[in-house]
């Protein structure tokens, strides 16, 4: 609710890694509301991805064991 309408929120792909793309989301707000906006945006993104069925990233490691 405390995100400023201007400038518009920026969403960019920051990088690609082994578990998927890393997004850079930049909502603008008054400094007094920085932390509230920070946590609210993370919650909203998480909820939207869950509703869309996007799986949470999970790091994995494959081990190959050879018998001697």
Image (cartoon, rainbow, N blue to C red):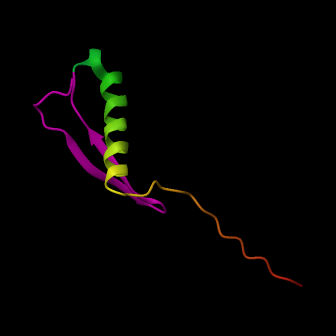
37 vs 32: above or below: below
Outermost residue to the top: 32
Quick one: quadrant of the N terminus?
top left
* In the foreground, 32 or 42: 42
Write the residue at 73% across / 76% down. Answer: 64
Q: Where does residue 6 sit, x and y in percent of width and height?
A: 10, 31
Count of marks, rendered view: 0
Spot occupied by residue 21 in the image (x, y as percentages of width and height): 38, 58
What is the magenta range? 1-29
Question: Residue 2 in magenta?
Answer: yes
Q: Foreground residue, 47 or 65?
A: 47
Instruction: Look at the image and say whether residue 3 sits in the magenta stretch.
Output: yes
Q: Which of the two residues, 29 or 40, is positioned nearer the viewer here? A: 40
Residue plotted at (11% across, 30% down): 5
Q: Residue 36: x, y in percent?
A: 33, 22
Q: Residue 10 placed where, x, y %?
A: 20, 42
The answer to whether 30 appears left or right of 7 in the picture is right
Image check: 16 left or right of 67? Answer: left
Residue found at the far bottom of this picture: 68
């Amino acid at each position: 609710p405390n995100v400023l309408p201007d400038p518009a929120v920026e969403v960019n792909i920051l990088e690609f890694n082994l578990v998927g793309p890393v997004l850079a989301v930049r909502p603008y707000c008054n400094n007094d509301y920085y932390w509230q906006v920070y946590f609210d945006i993370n919650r909203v993104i998480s909820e939207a991805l869950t509703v869309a069925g996007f799986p949470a990233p999970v790091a994995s490691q494959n081990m190959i064991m050879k018998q001697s």
